[in-house]
Amino acid sequence: MRKPPKDKLVAGPPPPPSTPPQSQAPHSPPNPHPRPTPEPPTNQSAPTAAPHSPAAPTNQPASGSTSEGSAPANWSAGDAAHRSAGEAAPLPLAHAPATASPGGGAATPHGHTTNRSAGGGGRDAALDGIRGLAALGVWLLHVGGNTGVIYRDGMFAWMTTRLGIAVPIFFLLSGLLLFRPWAKAFVEGARAPGTPRYLWRRLLRVFPAYWLVTALALWAWGSLDGYGWATWMLMLQNYTGQGQAPDGLYQMWTMPIELAFYLALPLIAWCLGVWARRGNRAVRLLGGIAVLPVISIATVVAAHVWDQPQMALWLPHHLIYFAAGMAMAVLSVWIKESRALDSLAPQLLVLAVLLYAMLSTELAGPRTLTLPSLSQSLWRMMLETAVAVLVVAPFALAPRTDSLRHRVLGNPVSAYLGRISYSVFLWHAPVITLYYKVTDAEPFNGNFWPVATFTLIGTLLISAGSYHLVEENALRLSGLRRRAPAPPPGPPAREPSGAAR
């Protein structure tokens, strides 16, 4: 196999080998998986090599959102992933069960966590199920991109390309689960999490599994020097001008964004707490959170006007998704549980499907390397935010566990998949890369089912092992998973009366 040319940081699976590198607009890096045709589109981003192909897409920021599995919205092909981070994810993205912190649920990268439902309680199996399905969406997006299936004609191919919606969902879950303890503290006067303890838990939740996957991929397929290794191991890859992403790591662009949110959240929460001291605290919190989406929109416009595509790899570009989750956290504490939302849940989920179909049209930008316009980038960001909110709200704000939607998404299989979803997110790209390395198969040849079958089985097996051997032990070390306290001793048994004898 030919060694791919070194170019920009790769965002996802590769474009066709014949696609020549070109400059790319700031606001919307195209699909990392362009159509496998010899005739490339006119406006293209510089291709970089994917883990297994002769050329790979550039790791440039997306137009309005980071939605396709491995790169920000404008990147396309890998538009998915991603998320997970928070004490739950984050996609992300925590992905493991744990006891919630004093104020509420904990999150993990890309949205996994030990999360408490709106009304209190323990872990929410339905939210775990959402994370699990989002992680599968990222995997499916990258399989479809590597095989070229998503670049065929038809609505199904377009809708598959937009599975990058998993990233906004992961980010929203991180905002919901990580900010909830602060929201509870501000609205109800509960105890807020201490910053040192919070950061310690976050770092131990995210880094051990990330280090394992990244180190193995760099050792097996990378050719970086010490500086390159340090950049990737410290999650600084989004801030350096290095070349293409190493094979098997093209999905990792979301991790620095998650980490940046973890680090910024205590400061954001402090500012919101100061702002909310007077008047109706819940209302003022929501008003303060409303500033964050404005920052994201301004970032999209600035990236387009100033031709700075790398801005889509930074936290401000994605604050709108985290803010949606933070607002949901405030509502879950303030209103506890919405009966109206519970009764409208089926309609909201249907609306989410309809908006996802709209997201899959050219209104939200092209699938290929052709650059989207500023309006397409903004439409995409708005539609992704709306879909993510409509998918999560019926479960976070109307957590009636006996409802059909909870039984479907909260079943043991989907809930377990949600717990291991962080590992699924980390491992699926190396497994896809390994398949192409071992079989020497050509990308974009349409062999979807062999690739999907091998990589799904391999990813699930490795992810389950990684979760139980690495993530669970890290959670114990961080204090996220504690043994349940022994129940208090019951009253002494009474002697049976003579009549009873």
Image (spheres, rainbow, N blue to C red):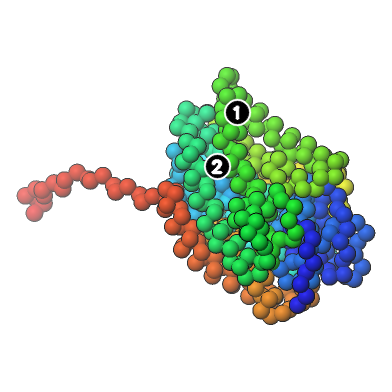
Instruction: Determine the image quadrant of residue 341.
Output: top right
* Residue 126 appears in the rendering: no
Instruction: Determine the image quadrant of residue 429.
Output: bottom right
Which corner quadrant holds the C terminus? bottom left
Front of the two marks 1 and 2: 1
The outermost residue toward the top is 278
Q: Position of residue 86 (x, y in %)?
A: 56, 47
Q: Amino acid at mark 2?
A: Leu
Q: Is residue 95 above or below residue 35?
A: above
Instruction: Give the class, few, some or many, for how many residues have Cα within 10 Å of label 2's Cα (few <14, many ≥20).
Output: many
Q: Residue at x 47, y 36 (%)?
A: 194
Q: Is residue 428 above or below residue 410?
A: below
Q: Which residue, given by chain and number where applicable, does mark 2 sit on?
A: 178
The outermost residue toward the front is 226
Q: Residue at x 60, y 33 (%)?
A: 268
Inter-mark Cα distance, 1 to 2:
16 Å
Q: Position of residue 42 (x, y in %)?
A: 93, 59
Compared across the picture, whether 437 is left or right of 105 comes to right
Compared across the picture, whether 96 is left or right of 405 comes to left
The outermost residue toward the bottom is 439
* Mark 1 or mark 2: whose residue is earlier in sequence: 2
* Element class at badge 1: helix
Q: Residue at x 81, y 53 (%)?
A: 29
Q: Amino acid at mark 1?
A: Cys
Q: Which residue, given by chain and number where applicable, does mark 1 sit on?
A: 271
Which corner quadrant holds the N terminus? bottom right
Q: Is residue 220 above or below residue 63?
A: below
